Image (cartoon, rainbow, N blue to C red):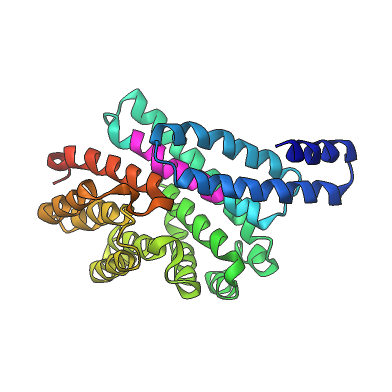
C-alpha cells in the first residue's frame, strides 16, 4: 500500500507529465483488474454489492489519467454490465411492477447499461476502423468487427452485453431495434475468437438473442437451444447459463416443466464448485428463487 501511495503522489506532483500519468494509471489499472477478479470470487453477496460501486468510481477516476486506455475502458464496461445485471436487475424482478421501487431500479438499469455500452464503444474506438464503423453502413461495421483480434475480445463482449441489455429495457425505442444486427455481429466475433470466452457466456448470450426475437427479426428457437447447450457444455458449473435458459428459452417455449427443471438444478448446485465465479453463482441462485416465485405470473 505504501508503494502505491508513493506512485500516486508522484503522479500528482508531475501534473502535466503525460507519461507519468499514464504509467500511474496503468499500474493502478492492473490493481483494479485484480480487484474485479477478487469481487467475482467473493462468497458474501452483500459485501460484493457494497464493494463494486466504489471500485467502479475508482476506475472512472483513473480513466481521466488516460482516456484512451482500451483495457481500462473495457474493464469499466464489464464492471457496469456485471453490477447492473447481477444486482439492479434483481431489484427490478423483486419489486412489484409499477411500484416506485420498480421504476427506480428500471431507470438505474437503463442508465448503467448505457454507461457500460458507451465505455465499451470508447474501448473499441481505439481501433481506427471501428471508430469509423459505428457511424457507417452495417456492412462496413461487420468488416471492422471481423478485423478485430484477441486483444479486443473483452471490449467486444461487454459492449454487446451492455448494449443488448439496454435495448431489452428500451424496446419501444426504434433506434434500439436497428442496433441488433451490430450486437449479433459482435457476439459472433467473440465466439470466432474464443468459443469458451467467459465460461461460454457468448454462446448463452447468443441463445438469449435467438429466443427473444420473433422469427422475422432473426429469432430461432432451435439455434437458441443449440447455443445454450454449447454454453453449458463449456462450463457446466457456471449457473447463470441455466438461469438464462429458464428465464428466456423455457418461457418462450411456454415450457413450465423445463423452467422448473433448470431453476431446480441451479438451486441444488454448490455455488463454490466454480470458486472464481462464486459471486455469479450465488446471484444466479438468488435470481432462480425470484423466478420460481414468479412462475404462475410467467406461465
**Front-most of residues 259 and 8:** 8
Is residue 80 left or right of 203 when viewed as pictured? right
Q: Which residues are magenta?
A: 76-91
**Front-most of residues 87 and 10:** 10
Characterize the magenta stretch by its predominant secondary structure: helix
**Residue 56 seen by the camera:** yes
Numbered label tally = 0
Task: State whether residue 282 is above or below residue 126.
Answer: above
Q: Quadrant of residue 86?
A: top left
Residue at x-position 44% and y-position 60%? 198
- Horizontal and vertical percent position of residue 277: 41, 51
Residue 137 lies in magenta, yes or no?
no
**Front-most of residues 75 and 234:** 234
**Residue 113 seen by the camera:** no
Q: Residue furthest left?
A: 257
Residue at x-position 67% and y-position 48%? 29
**Front-most of residues 174 and 255:** 255
Amino acid at each position: 500500500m505504501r508503494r502505491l501511495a508513493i506512485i500516486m503522489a508522484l503522479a500528482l506532483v508531475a501534473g502535466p507529465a503525460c507519461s507519468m500519468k499514464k504509467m500511474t494509471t496503468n499500474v493502478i489499472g492492473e490493481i483494479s483488474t485484480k480487484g474485479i477478479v477478487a469481487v467475482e470470487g467473493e462468497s458474501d453477496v452483500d459485501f460484493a454489492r457494497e464493494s463494486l460501486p466504489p471500485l467502479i468510481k475508482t476506475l472512472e477516476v483513473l480513466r481521466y489519467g488516460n482516456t484512451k486506455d482500451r483495457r481500462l475502458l473495457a474493464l469499466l464496461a464489464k464492471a457496469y454490465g456485471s453490477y447492473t445485471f447481477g444486482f439492479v436487475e434483481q431489484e427490478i424482478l423483486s419489486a412489484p411492477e409499477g411500484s416506485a421501487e420498480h421504476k427506480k431500479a428500471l431507470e438505474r438499469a437503463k442508465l448503467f447499461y448505457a454507461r457500460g455500452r458507451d465505455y465499451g464503444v470508447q474501448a473499441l474506438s481505439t481501433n481506427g476502423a471501428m471508430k469509423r464503423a459505428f457511424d457507417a453502413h452495417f456492412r462496413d461495421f461487420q468488416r471492422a468487427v471481423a478485423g478485430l483480434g484477441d486483444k479486443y475480445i473483452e471490449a467486444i463482449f461487454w459492449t454487446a452485453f451492455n448494449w443488448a441489455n439496454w435495448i431489452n429495457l428500451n424496446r419501444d425505442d426504434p433506434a434500439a431495434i436497428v442496433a441488433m444486427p451490430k450486437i449479433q455481429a459482435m457476439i459472433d466475433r467473440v465466439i470466432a475468437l474464443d468459443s469458451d470466452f467467459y465460461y461460454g457466456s457468448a454462446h448463452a448470450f447468443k441463445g438469449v438473442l435467438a429466443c427473444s426475437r420473433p422469427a422475422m427479426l432473426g429469432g430461432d428457437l432451435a439455434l437458441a437451444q443449440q447455443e445454450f447447450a454449447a454454453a453449458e457444455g463449456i462450463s457446466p458449473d457456471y449457473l447463470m447459463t441455466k438461469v438464462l435458459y429458464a428465464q428466456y428459452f423455457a418461457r418462450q417455449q411456454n415450457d413450465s416443466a423445463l423452467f422448473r427443471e433448470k431453476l431446480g438444478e441451479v438451486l441444488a448446485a454448490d455455488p463454490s464448485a466454480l470458486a472464481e465465479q462464486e459471486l455469479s453463482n450465488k446471484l444466479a441462485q438468488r435470481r432462480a428463487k425470484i423466478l420460481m416465485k414468479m412462475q404462475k405470473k410467467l406461465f
